[in-house]
Amino acid sequence: MGESIMRIMIYFDSIVPSGGIERVISNLIKHVFINDQVYIVTKDDGEPFYDIGHARHLTLDLNQNLDMSSRFSRIKTRIIMMIRVKSKLKDKIVDISPDIIYTATPLNGLEVIISGGENIVATEHASYDAPNIVYQLMKKIVYKKAEFLVVPTKIDAERYWKDGYNVKYIPHLNTYEAESVNFKTRKNILLNVGRMTSDKQQEELLRVWSLIIHQDRIQNWKLEIAGTGELEKRLQDVIEEENLQDFVIMNGQSVDIGEKYSSSKIFVLTSKMEGFGMVLLEAMSFGLPCITFNCPSGPAEIVKSDVNGLVVQLNDFLALRRAIVELISDQERLELLSNKTYDYIKSWPNSEIIEEWHNLLHKVN
């Protein structure tokens, strides 16, 4: 990248999960930081789920064992962790002597600041409207001190700019290069991928699916929810309550998520809010039309009704039900949307995104 090699330190809690942020970091290492010396510093020492290419993985040896039973418990545990982090992270910063420190959460940014880190490029992966008061407070502290704040949606970038931050809009890379799948070989599966939390609203999706199965009498389709999380047991209970055992698939976190995308016909996202919606890009790479709520930011910038899916008013579950029934009842339209989705994702501006990142990094350095 460019004429000089930079030392880039990426600081994040863990690269073990298979979430959207971990995917973004993997993509940046392999496509943006490709010629730089990259160090990923994490709190744990687990194996990364995604390929981290030439990056060197260093650990603070602070395996978190987070209490995931509630949002409050996670916050409390992380504050305790932050106190333990300070000295170890400071040593790593001194040893690496990075030109740039990349952070993916306000908490990680705050930990870098109290550990003496400089030249921070902060990235935001949650919605601007994330309601947690502690999270909002950390954002104000970190983003004022960051060299740049990188945001993947236009709407949120504009809002952060109005707040006075040095913000840069750069959407995420899409690096899936899936081969076209014959629509007629796909199964009648409505797919949802994501962590099982209240924000993702999979319980509400199951309630909608129950109406489609038992009232609309559409019983030749299945809903598959791929992921794990704190609400997994609750979702299993709902499946039993609604008599959906024959109409829902839940097999946890998948190592080969591409196989699930390529064998399904529709992707559905029911999040209350999204910072971007990386799973939408992944799903579209496999030709999956997407049904999504019109979140405050993210999905509505990616999904265009009757181009690559359908956009539904936020939390209008009756409209969601109608949209699902509308598509699964019209195979000809669904196949047309699948073809148009392939065309849409091929035009995703990866080269421009990489160039934007290069320009930004050299401004910091």
Image (cartoon, rainbow, N blue to C red):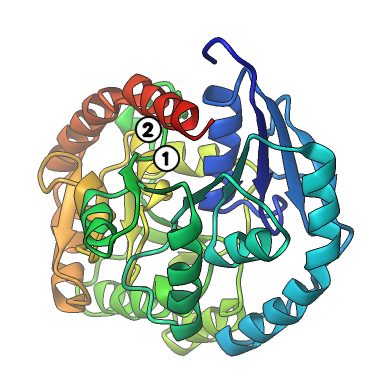
x%, y% of residue 189? 39, 52
Count the numbered circles shown: 2
Q: Image check: 221 left or right of 302? A: right
**Counting other residues with Cα less than 10 Å from the Cα at mark 2, is it few (<14), some (14-19), or many (20 or more)?**
many
Q: Would you place residue 50 above or below residue 30 in this image?
A: below
Q: Nearer the viewer, residue 33 or 335?
A: 33
Q: Residue at x 36, y 62 (%)?
A: 274
Q: Nearer the viewer, residue 165 or 160?
A: 165
Instruction: Classify mark 2: helix, strand or loop.
Output: helix
Q: Image check: 102 left or right of 137? A: right
Q: Would you place residue 324 above or below residue 154 in this image?
A: below
Q: Report which residue position mark 2 lands on.
A: 285
Q: Report which residue position mark 1 lands on.
A: 282
Return the residue found at the far right. 61
Asked which quadrant contains residue 217, the reply is bottom left
In the rendered image, is residue 246 in sight? Answer: no
